[in-house]
Image: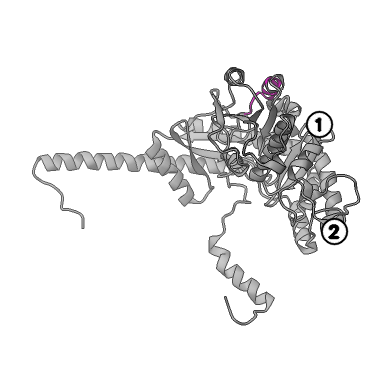
């Protein structure tokens, strides 16, 4: 750290120079490595305004405009995502925080029903809460259980079907084998395959057992916004809490996530705290900070409001459908080129394999080095795959075609290299057997 002050303009010049070689084009139309969008023009500008305004979005008294933006944007979100009117929503950092808030609401409600005040007395000595989740749940569910004091050993796993959605018959079997408060974690959008659980059937079973249904819908919940994909989340309104990301398919800047709860009083009871100097929001409703883990928090609602206003209901529907259609186009092009597509492309995720694990890993490395597009790898059911996620508002058919061609070109180069290496190995064995071994490498 320098001893003397530096003029702001010079600081920015130094920052630009220092960061230039370490930036990844995650906002670009050919970044498919994570389920993240770019950022819509209005959302980007609104986020810059939010930074400049520098509002502490804790309550309406200290940030009235931020509170209004979150209220309106929250109502719009609940509507387009197919949730019940009147649900509460906390604007959080992302899916991890949203899942943690949702499970905190479940913890409060289930233990309160059992006569236990978990906020006052903690979990030591509390009735045991059963936690049921699919084997192919997202890792943030496990992290939330650790953060909330449940631990991961409490999990009762449920089998997944062929494309990664929860097996309803096995869910029923698991629910039937135990008693007591039960929290069931469901999923809209398997992180590898995009598969969505049968929410209507699953939530119905959970209700029969008096439990709480939480839906991790970080990106899959957006399927509700398009008539073409809404059937994937049929029954979503029957759940008790939901997690969703804005910096994924809504295409707003980081950090932006949403924690919804069907019982606003439970939501506030699980997350709020009191401090005399923070009182006085004057609305009679929970303050912004009563629904999230933070009190000092940025005004995330401005960018979300701007994105929803820019897109409109029809624009959001077209965005979701276009990404879904482009993902299927991606899968078709790669399959026609000889790749193995492992999943049924129901949403925006594509899993691709070339030969075996080693060859697939080499193709991933070659694609990343090539630079036409960027994607990563994943392990699904014991095998390595290229994982392609299409969720950027600016991605076009031309981007997909160009990227698919680059992937197939890299795969051919890897295949040829592997073949040459195998031929060299055979040649070396023949020479060794003839006593004409090549010189050792230095």
Disc 1 from disc 2: Cα separation:
29 Å
Residue 321 visible in rendering: no
Residue at the farthest left position: 435
Along the line of sight, the residue nearer the viewer: 284 or 336: 284
User: Which residue does the numbered mark 2 point to in the structure image?
Assistant: 62
* Residue 187 % position (x, y): 63, 31
120 falls in the magenta region: no
Indicate whether 281 appears above or below 397.
below
Image quarter hosting the C terminus: bottom left
Q: Quadrant of residue 424?
A: top left
* Residue 62 % position (x, y): 85, 58
Mark closer to the chain start, 1 or 2: 2
Along the line of sight, the residue nearer the viewer: 222 or 423: 222
Residue 46 visible in rendering: yes
Instruction: Name the main secondary structure of what is drawn in magenta.
Output: helix
* Residue 288 % position (x, y): 80, 49
Q: Quadrant of residue 223?
A: top right
Which residue is located at x 60 percent, y 21 percent? 178
Disc 1 crowd rating (10 Å Cα; few below 14, some 14-19, many 20+) is: some
User: Which residue does the numbered mark 1 point to in the structure image?
Assistant: 84
Disc 2 crowd rating (10 Å Cα; few below 14, some 14-19, many 20+) is: some
């Amino acid at each position: 750290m320098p001893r003397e002050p530096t003029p702001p303009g010079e600081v920015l010049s130094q920052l630009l120079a220092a960061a230039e070689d370490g930036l990844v084009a995650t906002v670009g139309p050919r970044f498919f490595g994570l389920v993240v969008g770019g950022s819509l023009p209005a959302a980007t500008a609104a986020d810059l305004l939010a930074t400049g305004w520098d509002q502490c979005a804790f309550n309406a008294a200290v940030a009235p405009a931020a509170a209004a933006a979150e209220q309106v944007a929250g109502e719009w979100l609940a509507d387009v995502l197919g949730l019940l009117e009147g649900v509460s929503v906390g604007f959080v950092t992302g899916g991890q925080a949203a899942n943690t808030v949702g499970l905190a609401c479940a913890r409060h409600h289930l233990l309160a029903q059992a006569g236990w005040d978990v906020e006052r007395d903690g979990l030591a000595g509390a009735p045991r809460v059963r936690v049921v989740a699919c084997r192919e749940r997202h890792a943030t569910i496990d992290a939330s259980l650790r953060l909330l004091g449940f631990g991961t050993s409490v999990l009762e796993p449920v089998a997944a079907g062929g494309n990664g959605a929860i097996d309803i018959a096995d869910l029923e079997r698991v629910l039937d084998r135990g008693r007591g408060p039960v929290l069931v974690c469901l999923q809209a959008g398997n992180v590898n395959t995009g598969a969505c659980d049968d929410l209507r059937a699953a939530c119905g079973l959970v209700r029969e057992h008096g439990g709480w249904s939480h839906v991790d819908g970080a990106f899959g919940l957006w399927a509700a916004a398009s008539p073409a994909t809404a059937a994937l989340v049929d029954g979503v309104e029957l759940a008790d809490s939901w997690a969703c990301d804005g910096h994924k398919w809504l295409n707003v800047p980081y950090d932006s996530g949403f924690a919804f709860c069907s019982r606003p009083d439970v939501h506030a009871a699980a997350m709020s705290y009191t401090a005399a100097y923070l009182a006085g929001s004057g609305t009679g409703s929970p303050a912004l900070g009563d629904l999230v883990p933070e009190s000092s928090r940025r005004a995330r609602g401005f960018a979300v409001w701007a994105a929803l206003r820019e897109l409109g209901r029809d624009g959001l529907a077209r965005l979701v459908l276009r990404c879904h259609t482009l993902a299927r186009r991606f899968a078709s092009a790669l399959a026609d080129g000889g790749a193995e597509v492992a999943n049924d492309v129901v949403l925006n995720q594509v899993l691709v394999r070339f030969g075996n694990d080693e060859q697939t890993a080499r193709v991933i490395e070659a694609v990343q080095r090539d630079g036409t597009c960027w994607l990563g790898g994943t392990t699904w059911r014991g095998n390595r795959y290229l994982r392609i996620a299409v969720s950027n508002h600016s991605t076009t058919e031309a981007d997909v075609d160009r990227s698919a061609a680059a992937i197939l070109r890299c795969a051919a180069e890897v295949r040829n290299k592997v073949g040459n290496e195998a031929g060299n190995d055979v040649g070396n064995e023949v020479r060794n057997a003839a006593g004409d071994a090549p010189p050792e490498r230095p």
